């Protein structure tokens, strides 16, 4: 329990540190608002469109693949810790799991989900 | 922690009257402050180192002028106070938030990034006793907490409401997310060998000199694992040659385009703190952590507890130097090459090393 509290305190302290410097910046820095200064930067001219375009589908493919693989990856951790106790059976079981996962990767590969062009 | 509290309560100082909970809180805050400050100060030092190293690699001198008037430190020279001066300059700059930006998210984003990186230091083993929280899921905790930085980056890109920022944020998220798979997988190679996720267990499994380091075990599988891990973490930290999210020639400054003043400095600091984190993480997993490379040579002199933080920081600095060296040697990758490297090279190789080490351990 105390180990988790220690981490929470670390979070709080780092946030505090950043906050102190940020408020210092607010207090010490000049504040001169102007219309031109607060226009979003875009090659020096006023922007015509908003940036909320549709993004390329490629990003979504990567995101979906990540969710898939990251969830599967979690299963590896407890297995790796007790690997010595499980022995050959554990390796075979995880081998089948890796095979299925790898087939998924090959499928995504063949379907062209990994192509960025 | 428990022993420390006991020791203070048994001592005859004014602190011994305090209750256990009060002492625990005092220690937590102290430990947190010390570690967070060390991480931030180290980040400043690494900014200076990067400027000097890059300069000398390109046959320049780098910053040479900035100095302080402090009597003893006046004659050191070589521009040692340059990053301090830069930090102070950034404190005195205006904090500009563009009109179109979402003010609240624009403010939160750098904080999330900074907190995620600094909080990960709480499980880093600077010595056998020199850990804020020696969790039994340390390795997993680091992977979990560093994933938070994606949120900070994509939030910065989104909240700025600027095309460069959004593109940079999206690219960065795609990149960090892609490289998290190989870096998370390859750590398992070490976890399998040690049978524990606690950092101190992993480090102690490598005690007894340079030949016991994990990088030299199961040759060449662990060496491959180290290389995969190094490349993947390099990409996760958005460092060159994987620095597409802030590719200045195409995206201005990527997700940090609309940031100025100390908010921008926080981005910069967390990048260098992240490098330090990676250095410590990799040296704990592969390079023996806080154990000395000499083992019982020299009569075990270098094995004394006082040397532990020195060793791990030296190893971390060596890895950081490698990162800087790569930055100033290799050109930037293209986006498709980046994705190719992650999904088609590193991930399959990570699977192969895990399976190979499993087979080796059993037969």
Image: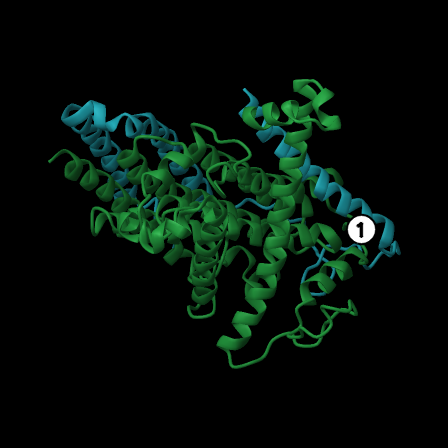
Residue drawn at x 56%, y 65% as measured from the top left:
B49
Residue at the spot 63% in from the left edge and 34% down from the top edge: A11
Q: Tell me where residue B261 appears, x and y as whole percent.
A: 75, 55
Quick one: quadrant of the N terminus of chain B?
Answer: top right
- Image x and y of residue A54, in percent: 55, 44
* Apparent side of residue B138 relative to residue A97 in the rendered image (left or right): right
**Could you tell me which secondary element the residue under label 1 belongs to?**
helix
Return the residue at label 1.
A25
Q: Is residue A72 above or below residue B96?
A: above
Chain A colour is cyan
Q: In the rendered image of this protein, does residue B165 appear above or below residue B146?
A: below
Depth check, front residue: A90 or A52:
A90
Position of the C terminus of chain B, as image quadrant, is: top left
The green one among the chains is B
The chosen color scheme is by chain
Instruction: For label 1, count other residues whose C-alpha is less than 10 Å away and answer few (under 14), some (14-19) or many (20+).
Output: many
């Amino acid at each position: 329990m105390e180990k988790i509290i220690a981490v929470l305190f670390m979070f709080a302290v780092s946030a505090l540190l950043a906050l102190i410097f940020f408020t210092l910046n607010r207090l010490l820095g000049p504040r001169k608002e102007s219309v031109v200064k607060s226009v979003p930067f875009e090659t020096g001219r006023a922007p015509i469109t908003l940036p909320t375009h549709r993004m390329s589908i490629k990003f979504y493919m990567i995101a979906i693949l990540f969710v898939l693989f990251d969830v599967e990856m979690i299963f590896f951790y407890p297995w790796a810790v007790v690997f010595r106790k499980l022995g050959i059976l554990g390796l075979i079981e995880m081998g089948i799991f890796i095979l299925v996962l790898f087939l998924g990767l090959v499928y995504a590969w063949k379907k062209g989900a990994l192509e960025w062009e | 922690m428990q022993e420390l509290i006991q020791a203070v309560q048994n001592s005859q100082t004014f602190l011994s009257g305090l209750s256990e909970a009060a002492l625990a809180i005092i220690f937590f805050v102290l430990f947190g402050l010390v570690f967070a400050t060390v991480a931030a100060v180290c980040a400043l030092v690494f900014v200076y180192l990067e400027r000097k190293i890059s300069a000398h690699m390109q046959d320049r001198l780098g910053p040479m002028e900035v100095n302080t008037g402090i009597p003893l430190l006046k004659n050191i020279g070589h521009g040692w106070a340059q990053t301090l001066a830069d930090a102070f300059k950034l404190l005195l700059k205006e904090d500009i938030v563009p009109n179109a930006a979402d003010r609240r998210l624009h403010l939160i984003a750098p904080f999330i990034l900074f907190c995620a990186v600094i909080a990960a230091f709480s499980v880093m083993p600077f010595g056998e006793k020199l850990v804020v929280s020696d969790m039994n899921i340390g390795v997993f905790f680091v992977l979990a907490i560093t994933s938070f930085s994606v949120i900070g980056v994509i939030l910065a890109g989104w909240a700025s409401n600027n095309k460069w920022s959004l593109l940079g944020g999206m690219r960065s998220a795609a990149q960090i997310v892609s490289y998290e798979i190989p870096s998370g997988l390859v750590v398992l190679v070490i976890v399998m060998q040690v049978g524990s996720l606690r950092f101190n267990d992993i480090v102690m499994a490598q005690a007894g000199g340079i030949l016991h380091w994990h990088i030299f075990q199961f040759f060449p599988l662990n060496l491959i694992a180290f290389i995969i891990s190094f490349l993947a973490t390099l990409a996760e930290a958005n460092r060159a040659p994987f620095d597409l999210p802030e590719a200045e020639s195409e995206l201005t400054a990527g997700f940090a385009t609309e940031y100025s003043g100390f908010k921008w400095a926080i981005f910069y600091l967390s990048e260098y703190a992240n490098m330090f984190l990676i250095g410590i993480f990799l040296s704990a997993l592969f390079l023996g952590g806080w154990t000395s490379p000499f083992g019982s040579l020299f009569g075990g002199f270098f094995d004394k507890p006082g040397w532990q933080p020195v060793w791990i920081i030296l190893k971390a600095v060596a890895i950081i130097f490698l990162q800087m060296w790569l930055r100033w040697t290799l050109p930037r990758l293209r986006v498709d090459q980046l994705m190719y490297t992650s999904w088609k090279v590193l991930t399959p190789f990570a699977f192969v090393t895990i399976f190979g080490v499993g087979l080796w351990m059993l037969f």
